[in-house]
Amino acid sequence: MLRLRRNFHFSRHFLLLKPFSTAAPPPPLHLPLSHPTYIVWGSNTSVGKTLVSAGLASSFLLSDSPSHFLFLKPIQTGFPSDSDSRFVFHKLSSLYRRRHARLSLLASDHVLNASLPVLNTVSGCGDGSELAMCELGRYEEQRLVGEESGLGSRLICKTMYAWKEAVSPHLAAERESGVVDDALVIQSLQSCLNSGLGVSGESEGAETRAMCLVETAGGVASPGPSGSLQCDLYRPFRLPCLLVGDGRLGGISGTISAYETLKLRGYDVAAIIFADNGLENEVVLSSHLRDRVPILVLPPIPVDITDDLMDWFDNSQKVFDSLKEIMLSAYSKRLNGLREMPKKAKNIFWWPFTQHKLVPDEAVTVIDSRCGENFTVFKDQGHEFMTQQFDACASWWTQGPDAALQTELASDMGYAAARFGHVMFPENVYEPALECAELLLAGVGKDWASRVYFSDNGSTAIEIALKMAFRKFSIDHGILDSQECNAEAQRTELMVLALNGSYHGDTLGAMEAQAPSCYTGFLQQPWYSGRGVFLDPPTVYMHGGKWYLSLPVGLQPETLRLENAFFNSRDEVFDEKRDGSDLAEIYSAYLSQQLSYSSKSKSLLGALIMEPVIQGAGGMHMVDPLFQRVLVKECQDKKIPVIFDEVFTGFWRLGTETAAELLHCVPDIACFAKLMTGGIIPLSATLASNSVFESFIGDSKLAALLHGHSYSAHALGCTAAAKSIKWFKNPQTNLNINSEGTSLRELWDENLVYEISSHPAVKRVVALGTLFALELQADGSNAGYASLYARSLLLKLREDGIYTRPLGNVIYLMCGPCTKPDSCSQLLIKLLSGLDDFISESRENLESCHS
Amino acid sequence: MLRLRRNFHFSRHFLLLKPFSTAAPPPPLHLPLSHPTYIVWGSNTSVGKTLVSAGLASSFLLSDSPSHFLFLKPIQTGFPSDSDSRFVFHKLSSLYRRRHARLSLLASDHVLNASLPVLNTVSGCGDGSELAMCELGRYEEQRLVGEESGLGSRLICKTMYAWKEAVSPHLAAERESGVVDDALVIQSLQSCLNSGLGVSGESEGAETRAMCLVETAGGVASPGPSGSLQCDLYRPFRLPCLLVGDGRLGGISGTISAYETLKLRGYDVAAIIFADNGLENEVVLSSHLRDRVPILVLPPIPVDITDDLMDWFDNSQKVFDSLKEIMLSAYSKRLNGLREMPKKAKNIFWWPFTQHKLVPDEAVTVIDSRCGENFTVFKDQGHEFMTQQFDACASWWTQGPDAALQTELASDMGYAAARFGHVMFPENVYEPALECAELLLAGVGKDWASRVYFSDNGSTAIEIALKMAFRKFSIDHGILDSQECNAEAQRTELMVLALNGSYHGDTLGAMEAQAPSCYTGFLQQPWYSGRGVFLDPPTVYMHGGKWYLSLPVGLQPETLRLENAFFNSRDEVFDEKRDGSDLAEIYSAYLSQQLSYSSKSKSLLGALIMEPVIQGAGGMHMVDPLFQRVLVKECQDKKIPVIFDEVFTGFWRLGTETAAELLHCVPDIACFAKLMTGGIIPLSATLASNSVFESFIGDSKLAALLHGHSYSAHALGCTAAAKSIKWFKNPQTNLNINSEGTSLRELWDENLVYEISSHPAVKRVVALGTLFALELQADGSNAGYASLYARSLLLKLREDGIYTRPLGNVIYLMCGPCTKPDSCSQLLIKLLSGLDDFISESRENLESCHS
């Protein structure tokens, strides 16, 4: 049987169950930009990709200035009778002789690895090895001397992997027991791209004198050796593309579809070129792709297979020259664009949460693209290149897709936009909104929620939740009589009960529900008054591998048993048995007192609002789950509606689909956003119980909840959410999920977490689900949200391929629900190393101060 | 030269400049659902589409129950030597004889229209007509009598348009002077689908005994006769698809790409079927498309062209039987889904602005899809069908794309998701955000704005604008000293200056900036207090073809010249010459008084906020532009920052890119959303002048604007915005834009607007840009937001194919910036007819009351 992509993925994953390896993680992707590198795709097989490659090579090399050209064929089947790299090598030699080139040319062809059947054919002997692929190392070279023997050009042709049968690579690989996994192809290709050209690339004007082509096999979506489609396989590089189209009958359709498949993977196509077949396919293609991509037409390819094509190449030369110019100019344009981006951005963006005065040009990160959890970023460190950084800020906690889900979501976004664009929601129904709502009620709203109210982001979801809660409370407590305000309403001031350190968003209503902080002063929002009773919550954290309880001032019992203040494991923290502890009684007494106290004031507590388990923006604090459970119970007993703000915690962020599951209790209203769409597009949902919904039912439209945003339940967002909700909880697609689909496996290696939590630079650690957070030991102005204390550590991590953003002296790493534990371990290893540097640096600073 | 899509579109458009036609508008699209209808696509030419069609027909017809099968070939080239409808007709006859079917079969083949060269070939004579295509009317019939002669089945094969040359339809049509435009193809196909089957479809169990197939020509993206791609041409029907894949080498790629092209047009593919070629293409295809679409494999197609294929059909019969079952079951599933949707929606959605008690099941609109400005909706009126409704509520004012832009945006959404997903914004830069910001500053922010702050929707954009304005005001007026709060700040209460009737969104901060209304009471938001000084604005409106000024109480001058209270045209209303009128002086004196009055109170006016020109949600009132211009000047003189809320008015909604252009003045801060992304995805931008931005620059992060949402400047939104901003203002893509790209042509026919504004049911009219609004004459509870007065009119309009939503007794029609004036005229004609019915109904009600 074939080893297909997903199966393979599975097997790779299982390897990671072996004991944690301390080997240095592989260096992040590195792609030089000192010269143009293009990937050549075909809109079908047999459309002449290699002819185009050879034509381009001739246009490049047989000119009057010394040039280097690298032709790479990563995947070759039908070898040795078919060898595209040797074809280019031979044709260039023939063209060189025919055209009496002035400069000398050193041309070579090198086949690196091959399957056993190839080896048997070529060398006549096999070693019976069990290895998938063997080193072949077949090398040919030809030195062609021109009029000027001193200066010379260089053609390097390479085949990376070759199989014997002239079939699709996945079939050949399977039949010849020579499967190469995707990671290896990517790694080998990277190494060829970095070393293969044999020029430093740093010499002046290098960009016009060196070029690499990577030629794919078959069509754009033909499988590679593992069964992965090649358009997916090569995606991490996102090389600019050249598409060889089809001039035959049906070729318009094939070319457009191939182009769309490439765009749907995030590729940019610099040009389309194809051989004429008398059908003027370029007319419709140009019209359809107008302004987007230049289209070039080559003379018809001779059908006689004995033709040496020399005349054809001669007749095509002008077209290839144009193509070369287009490719060079697209390269320059791209590079100039990348170079100018930081300055332009600094001139016109107004970044949120950013003091522009503190951002130097060189601190601006140019993000070229994302593939799964990784950004590809442009760097200039003397030489320019693309590299990868793990998105450890989870793009502000939204990031969810692995590379496979990202591809799926891209396809879904195209489909939803084509099918629906955006359509009106109130009083209407359409598939994605219905499916999304059904999935929400069956998942995060299971057993308590009956209605879904869509809006755009966490902040609006909270504003809606508050409006729901206040109506419900007002009716339950006689402030409203069946939606008519009575005299009571005019005198009533409603407040929320909330926790200090909480954060619910930046619109005024959401702000009013949180305690005063640096986000809320006159400087930020003169209208903020803080309409809540804000309690200091007890928190728990890990240090030196153990979990501790930290009680706030005001909640310090006279006696507290040691067993209550200290936990051997995180599971103990969440254990429901704690409900019977004396601490539970202490909490309950404290909260009763607080609630009765505020019931005496003229304002009423109309809602409890809280982030279950983890307070995110407030500094990644874990609130004692026992405290929150008791708090919910106290409020529900008093008919105060309970709102869970699961914007951050929802959808597996903490290892279960909701953080409510960790608390073992349910709210009356809950807000979701961020990861709900997989992390691709804004959408939020406020879920409510039926009794909350009922408090808006009446005879007048004025009793309805009159809150909405234009894109309510927009089709793209609902489509993304429906796909992601299913993807995350399906063990077939999310290998981190347990077989019941109820929780994520442990993503953060226990030993590494222990080590970090014991590190002298570290005050506390929280590791839960996709979140790993630590607080650096810091005093005075080094602590808190505005602190720049962690800067050197962050720069070190970025150099190491980890993109993080701090919350002052709190550093966190956040992955997606599908991220492989191995990737998480690599992050922790790099973090540990960064902490070592950080502490020794601090000590040096300290010593130099004292000396 | 070829007549290509865009050219064609252009010429069609010019026809509309002819005097307005009062002919009845064509009926909206109607697609029966009494039996399954599928469209058959090929992943390439010569993959055997017609073999699949014939096989399916045989599986359907040569069974033991009487059945009807319609095979439609809309586009046939190479005729008469190639005729797919005749092939199906002949093969079925042969198979009928071979299989000794029990039931009799009446089979026919009908070729409706053909080019002149076809006519010459077939009849040997041409009439030299100038017509593009001629009626051919070639009809063949065969009655095959089975054992049971009583009951019978029916095969109807039809070719709609035939050309002689065996090339792509666009080439054949061009060469044979037989171009058929897209609208005609669609119209003919609709008529064949409605009448062609010859069964009522209403008999019991009809769904298992009738089926239609529409077979396309060539590949999925092969051009039709006008040059439009067929996947675009047939899109308005969005028929469920059958994709005939490719089993050959390269066929995996071609099949996947073709599938993706269909999905990227919003099609659903029920099954993929292809003939085996020994390459096991189904293995990779199944793995890649797992859970999404069944894949069926047929035996290899004989290569011998003399083979009569009878054995092949016999060998394939089981596969065709399975395919038939899959198609029937997908049809049932779809239909059941559509039927259940209203009830499900009513059970779990919580619609915004909707009193659920007032929504009966039958009032829920099931939206199957959108194509440009039209919804396709599912209806059950005894028989079930799909029909179209013009989205005249512009899906809450967001709707912008025509069908061509929608296709472009779909492709862009797929690309942006694949390239970026979502990436982190602060301190970063990536192409779509940069391009979008540059376009905003060069367009809607031209000559005044220097910074772009991204957020998610209009409401958040307003909250950000207020924070910006208050900071700027506080620094300018000494309330803050270089971002340190001084004692003054603690005592200061900041208010906004705003207009009664304004609306800025539903989050608390945005609500606080608007006057008390039904949206703001304790019932909706107990925290609302209305932190503004709210002025009654003078308004202008049209009645009986003339424009009138309406001054509020409190702004009634003792004398007002007639010339000030009355305008002959809308242009006069906007004329800057009015700045010199005595009305300008009256406004100025009034506003000075208001401003000096409030400067004496303890609270300060920290910002002016207003919707320029039109107050949307407040009832589509046009504020006197002169008044707004004077107001802006008075505020800027007093260093009160001016915020324009262009969320509704921006991006051509009122005929210019911003409503500020109509006012001839610029703000300090402006908010955009809705149409900014073309109406496909939520995104908003708050633009600010440099001096506003500077008031947030300081040494501390705490001085920065600490407001943000997770998906700030998300790549999908910015990509959609960049495309739409360019599309709307480019005369090549938006035929409504004048050649300078500065304003839309008049979309609402002058005569019809006059007629409606003179209608006895109508109190006032506003027609401007893409907006046509009218207020119905109504008294007491019939007026205002909660009124249901317009209900019967709305129902009538929906029956007529117009989807509207009222603002109480205010009805509006809203199109997109690219909507053809002809479509707008059709809307007005239907509205006029609806008004006639409405008034006679009211009179009847009145009479029956009196009698």
Image (tube, coloured by chain):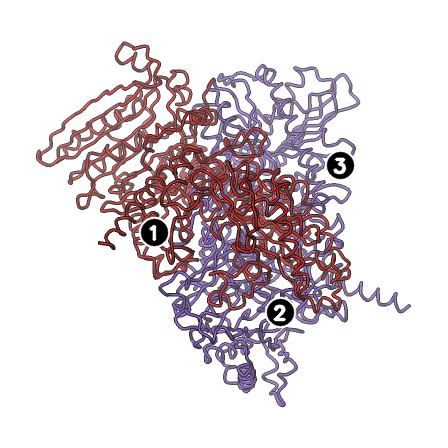
Chain colours: A red, B purple
Q: Is residue B357 left or right of residue B443?
A: right
Label annotation for residue B200: 3
Foreground mark, 2 or 3, reads 2
The residue marked by circle 1 belongs to what chain?
Answer: A
> What is the secondary structure assignment of the residue under circle 1?
helix
Give the distance between the C-alpha atoms of the residues marked 2 and 3, in whole angstroms. Answer: 62 Å
Give the residue drawn at x 56%, y 53%: A555
Considering the image in quadrants, where does the C terminus of chain B appear?
bottom right
Residue A589 is left or right of residue B715, and the answer is right
Mark linked to residue B529: 2
Mark 2: which amino acid?
Ser
**Residue tagged by mark 1?**
A791
Of residues A248 and A448, the one nearer the viewer is A448
Q: Quadrant of residue B443?
A: bottom left
Give how far across and how far down residue B351 sits, in percent.
67, 52
Above or below — where is B111 with respect to B760? above
The answer to whether mark 1 and mark 2 are in CB contact below 8 A is no
Mark 3 or mark 2, which is nearer the start of the sequence?
3
- x and y, in percent, of residue A844 in the image: 25, 49
- Chain letter, disc 2 residue: B
- Answer few, some or many: residues within 10 Å of disc 2's Cα (few below 14, many 20 plus, some between 14 and 19): some
The total of numbered circles placed on residues is: 3
B6 sits left or right of A497 in the view:
left
Under circle 2, the secondary element is loop
